[in-house]
Image (spheres, rainbow, N blue to C red):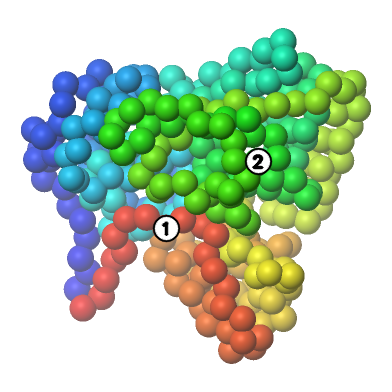
Amino acid sequence: MFHLFKPRKRSFLLDRLPPLRGKLTENAPLAKMTWMNVGGPAEVLFEPADEEDLALLVSHHLNIPTTLLGAGSNVIVRDGGVPGLVIHLGKNFSYCKVNEDHTIECGASLLVMELAKTAQKNGLSGFEFLCGIPGSVGGALRMNAGAHGSEIKDILISIRLINQKGEIKTIPMDAEFFQYRQNLLPSNWIFVGATFKGTPKNAEDIAATMAGYKEMREKSQPVGVKTCGSTFKNPEGLQAWRLIDKAGCRGMKVGGAEVSQKHCNFLVNTGKATAGDVETLGEEIRKKVLEDSGIPLEWEVQRIGIPLLRS
């Protein structure tokens, strides 16, 4: 027997919410909002009108399950759906403003690829590494996204956020906030924007560097497929894909989920995978790598919601 989260016809959550101006959707499908294209619905999906609208919600301390969903590039929504409230920052948080002092202010839902393109067009270097990273600015801040020897913290000036009291704050960058693929700020703080600093450089030279990164990515990683990007964090001093390959996992399948033949640290939805397929495949990889190398792999992809359980 399978247990699936089934929202009521009208969620009781709606009666507990303050008078919000943003969009509220019950039993909202989430699979299409993720790059892996799997998973169940949100009990209630909230798309805030602006920072103040979101701050109003947070300030009420409703004590209900709340999940923040960004661009969906580094997340697996489990098949049972996500109970409670799912917050999705939409187009109202995708602004991007270039200033005369070579800083760029942007919203948390702006794709980092768009941030890199904006910087290039304005002759600002330092953002090139972002051109091949999927996801939004908010997600990049939360996981300290990086590539080609650079990380988001390297260009960060400040973070705009809403804290657990519902206060809108701007805090300056501090290296102590960040570790490898991790932000140590409280997980219940919601990042709504950030300011970054670039270095003036010829726009054509920046474009050439970005083109080189794009070519490298297309040669070494699967593109044009349903995937979450890197599945596991690199253990210190090691590369996860090498450990996965050594354990004989290249091309391994569970249901419609498959380990990429091109890059072993990428899991791919071949067309009809469930979230359960993807997560089971990931756990099988972790088991095989542990048996082969004695090294525990840590998930880099975030998994949210309720799995389908067999009883």
Give the camera-side residue of 158 and 132. 158
Label 2: how many residues lie within 10 Å, few (<14), some (14-19) or many (20+)?
Answer: many
| Quadrant including the C terminus | bottom left
Q: What amino acid type should be assigned to the residue bearing mark 2?
A: Ile
Is residue 134 placed above or below 95 in the rendered structure?
below
Q: What amino acid type should be assigned to the residue bearing mark 1?
A: Arg
Return the x and y of residue 240 as percentages of the image width and height: 67, 69
Return the x and y of residue 278 as percentages of the image width and height: 47, 64
Identify the residue at horizontal 68%, vertical 20% (top origin). 103
User: Within the image, what quadrant is residue 153 found in?
Assistant: top right
Identify the residue at horizontal 59%, vertical 41% (top origin). 174
Rounded to the nearest whole Å, what is the CA distance between mark 2 and mark 1?
A: 22 Å
Asked whether disc 2 touches disc 1, contact meaning CB atoms under 8 Å apart, the reply is no
Which of the two discs, 2 and 1, sits closer to the camera?
Answer: 2
| Residue that mark 2 sits on | 152
Identify the residue at horizontal 68%, vertical 69% (top origin). 236
Disc nearer the start of the sequence (2/1): 2
| Residue that mark 1 sits on | 303
The furthest residue to the bottom: 291
Is residue 223 placed above or below 281 in the rendered structure?
above
Return the x and y of residue 29 as percentages of the image width and height: 32, 42
| Disc number placed over residue 149 in the picture, else none | none
Identify the residue at horizontal 20%, vertical 65% (top origin). 3
- Is 59 positioned to the left or the right of 220 in the image? left
- Is 183 positioned to the left or the right of 97 in the image? left
Say whether residue 111 is visible. no
Label 1: how many residues lie within 10 Å, few (<14), some (14-19) or many (20+)?
Answer: some
Give SS at disc 2.
helix
- Is 225 positioned to the left or the right of 118 in the image? left
Give SS at disc 1.
strand
- Is 124 positioned to the left or the right of 188 in the image? right
Return the x and y of residue 189 as percentages of the image width and height: 39, 40
